[in-house]
Amino acid sequence: MTAASLLEATSRPLLATLTFAQDVDAPGLWQRLWMGKNAGSALGDDTDAMYIWLWWFCVFWFVFLMALMVYFVAKYRRRPGVAAIVSPAHNTPLEIAWTVIPTLFLVYIFFRGFQGYMDKLVSPGDAVEMRLTAYKWNWELEYPNGGNSPATAVIGARSVPVFYLPAGVNIRLRMNSRDVMHAFWVPAFRIKQDIVPNRYTALWFNANDPSGDKTHPLDANAATARRLLDASAPDFIEEFKGVPYEDHWVFCAEYCGDEHSEMAAILRIVPEDAFNRWLPTTAEDPNASPADVGRAVYTVKGCASCHSLDGSPNTGPTWKDVYGHEVELADGSRVPGDANYIRESILIPGAKIVKGYGNNMPPFVLSERQIDGVIAYMRTMSVHAGGNAAPPATAPTDPAAPPGTPAPAPN
Amino acid sequence: MSTHDVPHDSHDPRGLHDAHGHHASYLAPKETFWATVKDWATTVDHKKIGVMYLFAILFMFFLGGAAAMAVRLELWEPVRVVTSTTPSGTTTTEVTGQLFAADAEGTSIGPGNNVYNRIFTLHGAIMVFMVIIPSIPASLGNFFLPIMLGAKDVAFPRLNLLSWYVYLFGSIFAVTSIILGGVDTGWTFYTPYSTTTDAQHWRVVFMILGAFILGFSSILTGLNFVVTVHKLRAPGMGWFDMPLFVWAIYSAAVIQVLATPVIGITLMLLVFERVFRIGIFDPALGGDPVLYQHFFWFYSHPVVYVMILPGMGIINETIAVHSRKKIFGYRAIAFASLGIAAVSFLVWGHHMFTSMSELASTVFSALTFLVAIPTAVKVFNWIATLYKGSIAMNTPMLYTLIFLFLFSIGGLTGLPLGTLSTDLHLHDSYFVVAHFHYVMMGGTMMGLMAGIHHWWPKMFGKMYAEKPAMIAALIVFVGFNITFFSQFFLGTQGMPRRYASYVDEFQFLHQVSTVGSWLLLLGFLLHAGVFIHSLTQGRPAPQNPWGGLTFEWEAASPPIEHNFEHEPICRHGPYDFESTVPPGWKPEDYPLPPATAPVPQGVVVARH
Amino acid sequence: MTTLDTRPPGPGAPEKAPLWARYQHGHHWRTAADEFDACKLGFWLFLTTEVLLFGGIFCAYFIFRSLYPAAWQEGSQSLDWRWGGLNTVVLLLSSYTMAASIYAIQTNQQARARRNLLITLVFGGAFLCIKFLFEYLPKWTGWHFDPTLAHGALFHFVEGYGGKRPGSLFTYPFATDPHMPLWWSIYYCGTAIHALHVVIGMALIARVYVRAGRGHYGPSHYTMVEMTGLYWHLVDLIWIFLFPLLYLIH
């Protein structure tokens, strides 16, 4: 029995005991108090076991010390005219004991922590590798077939990407930043790793199967806690309707500027077979029209998080009525919003800053086909296209919508 | 009067009786207002410098605290973008929940977040560089280190004045940066964000230069203290006769001298990187942003021990005096202080577990646990000091108990952070924020409050109103726990730090924390009121209100300009409460335990 | 006094005695010897801080050297060890003259002491001139300084030589390694911060020179001269480390 499997075998029962859970898989009182719910992965639960053990360790010694302190203060309070009782100011056996015993405890804690750390950090050899890119202020995940998860969700203040991932599979993320330091934190898995601009860092996890999700009867939020968007939301992918799923937040955990707090993502864990059926559809379609390619880029490359399609202001200028119009820049000059301008804005965004906006966009690496696609897509949103506006692609337009509004993006 | 028998004659090797006859209190004003101003502006008297530092630090504390109140206010509710459609079909979007929106139209969240980011950076930079690092050493340390050693001043009085002006000058740089609009890099200035953000260079450069200049003040103060302890002890005072406050200040001073130059070069390189793009931290030019983190934390970890050691030093004094008990394990505490100072240089990587290799992280985690042991031993020693004591309940003692409570929580919560597997979850979350506020504010600041109240009668010659001060202390205690204990739960549940907004599930705990901050403000305002009342209407303080045995209690309240009428000679230990009548007390007023015989008059206790 | 005392030493010694003989130590000290010892301890602590300051640069040097050895090799080959060597000799000589001036003060040879201080200053200035005119200027801009007027003017431009600048300012067209700008950044940071310390040292020496002229220093009181000497020796020592690391090790 390896250390890791021993850890795994004892952690869940230990966690259940320490947290007063009624069921070895359900979150106990203290796990819910501290973590909100049980972890989304087995190693996450191991971490919780370590944490809750530490919690009780600290509680025990803290209560002991404070009780002693309060007791002494009460018992030995000053009485006028009465001197303090003489007692030695040294006690070598006691001092040795209270040095050695904490040391032994700390050595134990260090080793337990080290084991859990190595388990979480060293990815299994059979892990499926996916590429994660972080930039101000969004995430991009690329599947092994080169495709991306096309879903986004609008929560709170902005749109966040939804990354569909299979349960029960060892997934390793090879991560890199396009600009400043970021960090990828999945609280549910209890893992985090910094993302650095000049090298790759890695993180791996194995998500629990959502159909096995057991919720504690007392956990009133359990039914909704793990479904950050329900199946009726417009961005929900068709293939996964009716399939059990579980959502986990991803937060950026290294300060990166203005929208650091909005730089979130959702990991949607779905059963492996459903995921494998759906995955081939994410690969780039060689027959898609340029505007369709552009629409996909808009979603999966994260343009949606800063650029609106309907004229409303956001972190970056809207894409509506750019192509074929004149663009006013921050230095007062006016340039034509033509294909060259759009291309430059993607590859060297800092070259021309639109009036009223900051120099916040990182450069994007898009293929020529993708750049053509973005240009074509932006043409569909221009009233005066200066040429034939390409018709909106496959999704049906809503006859009730006023003319000029873009077609809803297909899922 | 003391029992020293140095004769009043011309043999006066330390020049205490000079021709100018300075027997007036150091606080006595000069003939005219401007003469008094000039006196304070050009003083080399460590007491005046200490008092000026004290008021500057308390002022900066309120400034940084105001920023904190703003931070907590912004976090009352999350930022939401609400899109609504009117019946006529027009959609409007507006941003709600954002307190400090800078965007005129209010529809984009970035500008408002930017204001918040600048406010939390301000809070951190002011609190770390202008409050906590100088807090105890520059104020109470300056005032009492020489006096406790029986000296007339620190080793280099003019250097001390220079330290004070450098502190002012550095603070002006920082304030200039704030007036120009402030920076949003976080007080840690991580690259590449700090070297690439904000097209207006000068705000970032001024703030960094401010920190750099403040570093010089810290180095010079530390240097002064180290030499003072080595060279200016009273006759008869060996190393193990010194009060433990002196040991603490000395250990902190050693760290200040050795660690601060590293942040100096780091900040200098950061300015060059920012202004000249030299590329040392820039991945595009081959540099390494993680190298910056190593350089930064190589100083910034030892500096947290500069922050806490003096606080612990004060606790030694208050707990002994107000329990009338010899400190348990004097040598253990003295060596633990030095040990903490030494090991503090070996653990900086525990701030970077998520950006270092596995091997480095493992080594740093092991060393971090090592530094926990002397700290824990100190806490045990203090509690053991209470055993069979005679414990008075007053504001210094109350703050001592508050320190023990809050610092223990802070120290214990360091365990999940030093443990590698749990730190992967807790790093850069609110758990860390709560931990360091418990140790820095619950430790150092509560130690400072204990020290201020303990030495207030000595420094200003006035008593403060005890009951209102104790009520204020309790309000601070309750407010502090409400503010920061809730943040431990926020952290474990997944709330990252430095966030201007958050997802809905965290709102309740954030609101609890904000309410706590209002209580904290109330408590400190009450303290300010007690201080002002004492300075204007407080009753005069006796020479030794608490019955302390260290040299400051042999001086007048407030001390004369040269501290002592006659050079004190060390005749008893600093905590010999069982056998010594405190200076300024009549024997009949001070109960000695019957089992001990008092030291006969005229006998010099052999030291060394 | 408890405020800054700018008055000349008080009475007690005969008026004809030089200033250094009438020196009164700070009244918080028991003896002048105590004060001198304390000043030495304090100054050594300060020197430690300077060593740690440069330690950061050395640390960066070694880290990037191990990451980019090719750039380091190319960089140090583009430095002329003869100028660096000359500078090393200049600083070593200046340290000797500085020590000689301290000895002279200790034996009350005031004129000799002042002469040696002046020579030290001149050597310091020579160091800065060599560094600026023969190293920084040509590398940064391509303009070479030639006092022999071999090219007809004091300064002449050499094409393709300049542009060796730090970081993003690097424009030297013939660099073969992409990390050359980093090497130059370390070179300039190290040598410029060192040059700043040379300037500070020269200012201290100048002040001591002026005050020595007024008779402030003598056998019983030469603290400031000793401290300045220590500072100057440290400046020399830092260069002794910088020189081989930058110029000699390939």
Image: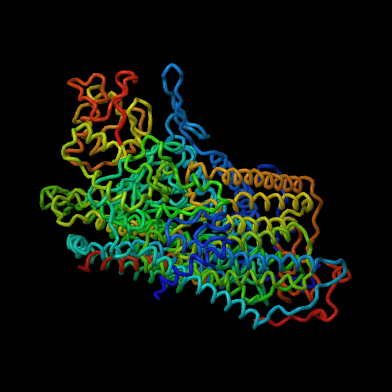
Name the quadrant of the N terminus of chain B. bottom right
Residue at 27%, 25% in the rendered image: A381
Residue at image x 72%, y 44%?
Answer: B529
Which residue: 21% across, 24% down?
Answer: A391
Q: Quadrant of residue A319?
A: top left
Of all residues, the one furthest to the left in this rendering is C151
The image quarter in which residue C53 lies: bottom left
Could you say which is closer to the camera, residue A368 or residue C112?
Answer: A368
Q: Position of residue C165 (x, y in %)?
A: 23, 51
Colour theme = rainbow
Choose between B160 and B143: the one closer to the eye: B143
List x then y, in percent, for residue A362: 30, 41
Q: Where's residue C223, x and y in %? A: 49, 67
The quarter of the image holding the C terminus of chain B is bottom right
| Residue B98 visible in the picture | yes
Q: Is residue A401 left or right of residue B52?
A: left
Question: Which is nearer the eye, B526 or A249?
Answer: A249
Q: Is residue C14 visible?
A: no
